[in-house]
Image: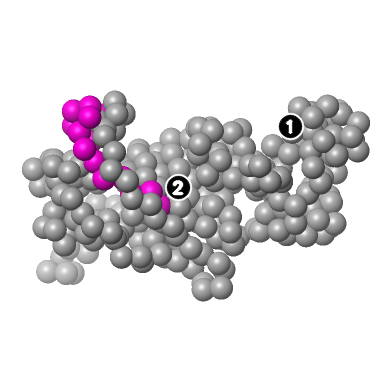
Amino acid sequence: MANRYEQIADDLRRLITTGTWPVGERMPAEAELAARYRVSTPTLRMSLELLQSEGLIEKRHGIGNFVRQQGQRVAYASDRSLASCQAASDAGTGNSVSLDITMVEADGRLASLLDLQVGSPLTEYVFISHQCASPRSLTRIYVPHTVATLGVPEPNGSPWGDSVRELLSADGVEVVTTTERVTARFPTPDEAHTLHISTRTPVLAVERTSSDASDRVVEGALLVLPGDRIEVLFTTESAAAATEEMETAG
């Protein structure tokens, strides 16, 4: 038999899917819903968190819970080409990317990521992508001042920080190798707040480092992608196919 919070989630799901609460509408306050279902507020919140994890609603802190627009899933590809293509999908879907730039000092985690000493000066680029006003990704990119002091990237609609790489290239810094580590975890409170998700909604966390020909780390990136609206695609060529392609090109 389903738990009480699961039963409530089933009924809330029905109300959403039948259009009782249209997309974008604010749901009744949590206290009102708890009274309606005769349960405690913590039990009601468990129901709401279940719907948040399914991508049906989003919590806007200090405002309330809203029925979420069901947008296109964003694909993060290992070769990055598909990621940019998907993120810049059809005009009219309400896609946008915001950018904030700050000068920071490397803490322990960033110092380890960038192979620097703690306290080293960095430029932090924070990209937040939205689709139909719903956050889709959070990207934080770090460039050490010992590598380059860059200006403001040209807006190109990419949430992955490709414009920062373009600035590096223009400054004569060539990225030769890129390593990405993908893990699944729960978001930090700040990440959950930014992405309008529950702290119990899993996210995909991508840790990326890019190096030049001398193996110097020239860029580090921390990407956080809500698990309910993201998929990761990996494409690998066989050795025979790669050899044939090289022979054809030659």
Label 2 sits on a secondary structure element that is strand
Other-residue count near label 1 (Cα within 10 Å), few / some / many at <14 / 14–19 / ≥20: some
Relative placement, left or right, of 130 versus 235 is right
Q: Residue drawn at (50%, 32%), measured in percent from left and top?
A: 188
Q: Residue drawn at (51%, 73%), measured in percent from left and top?
A: 91
At which x and y percent is residue 39?
A: 87, 29
Of the numbered discs in the image, which one, if any, rests on residue 221? none
Camera-nearest residue between 187 and 150: 150
Kind of residue at disc 2: Leu
Of the numbered discs in the image, which one, if any, rests on residue 138? 2
Check if mark 2's residue and mark 1's residue have beta carbons within 8 Å.
no
Magenta run includes residue 117: yes
Q: Is residue 150 above or below residue 95?
A: above
Kind of residue at disc 1: Met
Of mark 2 and mark 1, the one earlier in the sequence is 1
Relative placement, left or right, of 224 versus 102 is right
Q: Which residues are magenta?
A: 112-127
Residue marked by disc 1: 46
Other-residue count near label 2 (Cα within 10 Å), few / some / many at <14 / 14–19 / ≥20: many
Looking at the image, the residue that sits furthest to the bottom is 91
Camera-nearest residue between 242 and 95: 95
For the N terminus, the quadrant is top right
For the C terminus, the quadrant is bottom left
Q: Is residue 178 above or below residue 25?
A: above
Between marks 2 and 1, how big is the CA–CA gap? 25 Å
Residue 2 appears in which quarter of the rendering? top right
At which x and y percent is residue 52?
A: 67, 43
Magenta run includes residue 195: no
At which x and y percent is residue 156?
A: 36, 66
Label 1 sits on a secondary structure element that is helix
Residue 151 appears in which quarter of the rendering? bottom left
